[in-house]
Every structure is written in structure tokens, then in C-alpha cells.
Image (cartoon, grey):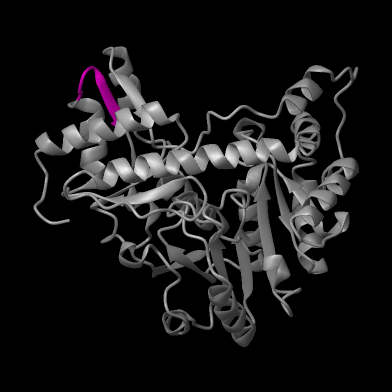
Amino acid sequence: MPNLSDKGIYLPPSPIRKLVPYAEAAKRRGVKVYHLNIGQPDIRTPRAAVEAVRNVHDEVFEYGHSAGNESYRRKLVEYYRSVDIDVSADDMVITVGGSEAIFMAMTICLNPGDEVIVPEPFYANYNGFAMEAGVNIKPISSTIDNDFALPPIEEFERLITPRTKAVLICNPNNPTGYVYSEEEYRQLRDIVLRHDLFLMADEVYREFCYDGTRCLSVMNLEGMERNVVMIDSVSKRYSMCGVRLGTLVSRNRDIIDAALKMGQARLCPPYLAQVAAEAALDAPASYFKEVHDEYAARRDCIVEALNRIEGVYCPKPKGSFYSIVKLPIDSSERFAQWLLEEFEYKGQTVMVAPATGFYASCYLGHDEIRIAYVIDRKDLVAAAECLAEALKVYPGRTTGQ
């Protein structure tokens, strides 16, 4: 039997999804599982998007443009203008989810063996995209002690080598909920320009900022036109995760031309997804206000409930709908599996994501989990109660916070 490639063997599994078999087994035993493990919102997709797909009467679903349907890209221009981002339809390539946009950016901007600096904890699938592209992630650690603010710029300087070609950030952040400030963006801009690097920004949670926090876009950093790549997606903005449609945006013509060639290799982004997304762009401001207010209320609900548990610390996220939570446990991997295999409280348990999967540094995240507050408030309260009871009896509980 022939051997698989190294990538096929060593590609990391998703820390968010690898516990699914244990959750399925728990459900077969009749246990109710509260899913805090994955960012799958229960918010309704805009009705206009659903109706647009239902009303498609094409006799043939033809190939589309490799950069994405022009009507959709032109409508995206209007959306970006509404959030103070000035781009043209020629500055973007529509992708199969934000995931393809990140992979494209890594492949276009870096050669195999090159390095990208990423503040950790970071979205777990960056590890997989980097391995597929042959790129090395150089993690720079942020900590829960200051709610995961950007590490000091001197630490970035120490990591830069001749192979360093890019910095990748997620803002608002998944998994921490942190939102970078204007000063932190200035620091990033300065180091990127000083070392002639690319700055890649995953901005898919732009709409979800709380308490008056302002989300800045890398597209508005002055003097960075050729250095910046923005990653976007409709998945969370319109609660349309399953349509798998994203966007790579840059004012660097070379990047867009290269992305288009990659797009031609996979022919075109999915047609029906673009139909749905184009219609979703007509969602009224009231849709976003309702969704924003609901997530803010859920955040307050779960953060307050978790911080009442002895030995637990949960920062109050400024954005997205995630948080890293510090627990008095020996291993987040064992704890997450134990919750599903051995624990139940009133016929219920909780599925969480071990934070170890969101770090590249193997010694971090063992006493942390990531939660997604994407279920209703009643269920969030019940989930927090389950976690409180679980921590009372978990055999690997530790004494410190």
C-alpha cells in the first residue's frame, strides 16, 4: 500500500470538530448537549436570502466569473462603502468561504518555508491552511491576563527573520473576542512597513463589536495599499455559514491577479451561494441592530454566569461571539472529552472547544477552553450551571485560578 504524503498524515484535525463523535454518543444515551464549541449561530438568515434561492428559475446553472459574479461584487462595493471601506469591484475575488481566501493569501504572498507571524491564540484552522500552503506559523503569545491585547511590538521584532513575509491578525478576534485599538493598528502598520511585510486581516466579525467599541479595518491604514490583504465572509454576518462564501480584498493589483489565477483553477465560486449573499446585502439596518443586541445580551449573560463559578475567569469580549475561559483544570482536552463521555447533570452536559487547538505553542491553553455564545440565553445559563457542577466533580480539577 503506498504511503500518504506528509501533509496528508500530519494535517491537524479541527479542535472544534474532533469531539463530535463523543457528542453524538452522548446524545444517543439521551443526554442533552449544549453546544458552546462551534460558532454556528442560531440567528435566522435574512429572509431575502432564503427567498432569493427559492425563486431561482434558471434552466441551467452555468459557470460564473472566476472572480465572482460582477453584480455581487458591485453590490459588495456598496456594502464596504457603508462601513467606510473604499474599494472597487476589481479589488476583490469571491472565494469558497473565508477559508479559501486565507489559503489563497498565504499561497500568493508566501513561498513554502516562509513565515507568517500570528498572535496566539488564533483561529485553529490557520494551522491547517499554513500546512497546506507549506508556510510556517510563528506564534506570538497574547495572554488572558490583559484580555489578549496585542503583544508588545518589541516581541514582533524579535521574531522577524529573513523568511518572515507576513503578519496575520483576526479582528474582532476569534477565539478571544478582543478588538484591536487604533494605537495597536498603528504599531502593526509601522512594523509591517519597516520590514516590508504583508498584513493579512481576517475581518469576518466586523459587525459584532460591543459597548461602543469601534472596529477598524486594515483597508484604512494609510500608506499600506500594496501590503494589505483583507479576508471577509458572509458566514457570521448573515448567519449563512453553510453557503461557504467569502471575499479576498486588496488594492495590490498583483495580489488580485494572482488570486484570480487561483480562482480560475477552481473555475468559479458557487452560483447559488452568490445568489443568497447578494440578496442578503439588502438586509435592513434593523436586522443588524437586533442581532448585535442579542449577542451583546448573550455575552453579558454567559460572562457573568461563568465568573460566578469558583476558580473560573472569563474576560468580557469586546467583539465577535467567542471568549477564551480559564478553568481550574489539568487538561482542557481531557476535560472536554470527560464532559461528553462521563458527566451529566440533570440529563445535560456541555460541549466546549479545548483552547490548546488555538495555540501553536504546545505548552499553552491546557487550562483554557473556547466558548461560542451562539445559543439562546436560557440555554447559556443552563450550560454555565452544568460547567459549575462539572468542575465540582472533575477528577483533574486543580487548586489555582
| Image location of residue 145, percent across then percent down | 30, 66
Residue at 11% in and 37% down: 392
Visible in this render: residue 269? Answer: yes
- Magenta stretch, residue numbers: 344-350
In the image, taking residue 35 as reference, residue 225 lies left or right, namely: right
Q: Which of 22 and 169 is in front in this view?
A: 169
Tell me which residue sits at (32%, 44%) in the image: 304
Q: Is residue 108 above or below residue 240?
A: below
Residue 228 in the image, given as x and y percentages of width and height: 69, 69
Residue 5: in sight, yes or no?
no
Residue 357 image position (x, y, % from top left): 36, 50
- Give coordinates of residue 119: x percent, y percent: 45, 66
Q: In which quarter of the image is residue 250?
A: bottom right
The quarter of the rendered structure image containing the C terminus is bottom left
Q: In this view, does 73 lie to the left or right of 101?
A: right
Please name the residue shown 44% across and 38% down the image: 298
In the image: residue 360, left or right of residue 346: right
Quarter occupied by residue 14: top left
Quadrant containing the N terminus is top left
Viewer-nearest residue: 281 or 209 = 209
Q: Which residue is drawn at 36% across and 40% down?
A: 302
- Occupied quadrant, residue 249: bottom right
